[in-house]
Image (spheres, grey):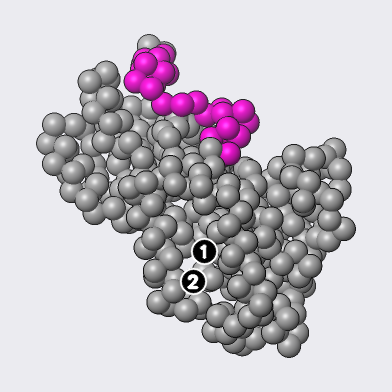
Amino acid sequence: MTPEEPICEIENLTLPYPVLVLSNRAGWGMYRVGQAIQERLDGAGPVRHFAVEDFLDEAAVSKELLRYRKICDTFPSLLHLMYKVPFFYRRKYLKQRNSAGEQALKLVHEIERFQPRTLICVSHRAAFWAGAIRGRLKQPPAIYAVLAEYGVNLGWKYLFWENIDFFCTPLDPAELPGHIRRRKKPVVLKMRLPVRREFLKADCGAGDFHKILITGGGWGLGRVETVVRALTRRLSGWFGHVVCGDNSALAQKMRRLSTACPIRVHENLPSLAPLMKECQSVITKPGIATLIEAHSLGRKIFLIPGLPVNEDFNATYAIRHLGAEWFSPAAFSQWYEGHDQGD
């Protein structure tokens, strides 16, 4: 495929059914993209979606996610080391190559039970485990690995690429690293990352510019409190929906702050669509699902710093292609006051 070829939509691919969509729950963005893929494909044949963690060793997954969450909460700079030093990914790759995916036998059994002919893997983690266990499947499906970020971290180098048939990317193939571009397999497809139908722009309106959606993603990360305090000092007539995800400590702090700031606090929500349609702007860290959902609805996106590497890729892309800009009190005030004068 060349960069000049048109971008494709997931529902326009010719896929043999049944289709199994495999994503992951680390941060929830990949899971939301997986939900969108399931929704787009549903109706043409049997489609199922679940997170890879649901069928891996529960104790090992809990330990890994707890460690990752702690790093994200307290030492996010360590992610630079994890994503840029080969040791971590290479060790995991060699361990599973030597054991032929023995740690994922529950996943093997669940896939065998559904008997998919197509396996769509949203994220490096999902593609890693699918590739590791393919040799254990009696009737191996065609495996599609989906890059659901706007950049390729080091982990993608350490996949069982010989077991991956297609690589779907929102980037031009020419932008991919050489270790992917130079391979004869998989076939590279440029694909738009889908959103669920509730985030499609038709008939949703422009939203109220006085209302602002502020979110730190599913884990409630980022400078949410700093943003709320800055808006309170600079703006008049505004109202904010603050989504804290499963960060109960942040939610409690925001509820105390709500006595002095015009905000309503939300914790875990099944979807951001109702709030996003109500608001004309979104202040968010560069999580992939929130970015593509806000852009699909035509919302103005302001970015706060997110997690290193992957969300750095997303931020750079969003500024270049999605009309996003970095949040600062001055930049947001300029945008807000421009709408206020034109109202």
267 sits to left or right of 29: left
Q: Is residue 153 positioned above or below 100 on the image?
A: above
- Do the residues bearing badges 1 and 2 touch, measured as CB atoms within 8 Å? yes
Q: Which residue lies at the image location 62% right of the left edge and 28% below the top edge?
A: 320
151 to the left or right of 264: right
Looking at the picture, which amino acid does disc 2 mark? Glu
Residue under numbered circle 2: 53
Is tag 1's residue or tag 2's residue first in the polypeptide sequence?
1
Q: Nearer the viewer, residue 73 or 13?
A: 73
Which quadrant of the view contains residue 100?
bottom right
Looking at the image, residue 59 sits to the left or right of residue 121; the answer is: left
Residue 343: x %, y % from top left: 38, 17
> Which x, y percent locates residue 330?
37, 16
Q: Amino acid at mark 1?
A: Asn
The structure residue drawn at horizontal position 50% and vertical position 26%, both measured from the top left corner, is 325
Number of numbered tags placed on the structure image: 2
Determine whether the residue tagged by mark 1 lies in a helix, strand or loop. Answer: loop
The quadrant holding residue 13 is: bottom right
Q: Residue furthest top?
A: 341
Q: Which mark is residue 179?
A: none
- Disc 2 residue crowd, few under 14, some 14–19, many 20+, Cα 10 Å: many
Q: Nearer the viewer, residue 229 or 181?
A: 181
Q: Main secondary structure of the magenta part?
A: helix
Query: Few, some or many C-alpha atoms within 10 Å of disc 1 (few <14, some 14-19, many ≥20)?
Result: many
Q: Secondary structure at mark 2?
A: helix
Q: Is 26 a magenta residue? A: no
**Tag of residue 24:** 1
Task: Name the residue at 38% across, 27% down.
Answer: 209
Residue 58 seen in this snapshot: yes
As for residue 314 lying within the magenta part, the answer is yes
Q: CA distance from mark 1 to mark 2?
A: 6 Å
The magenta region covers 313-338
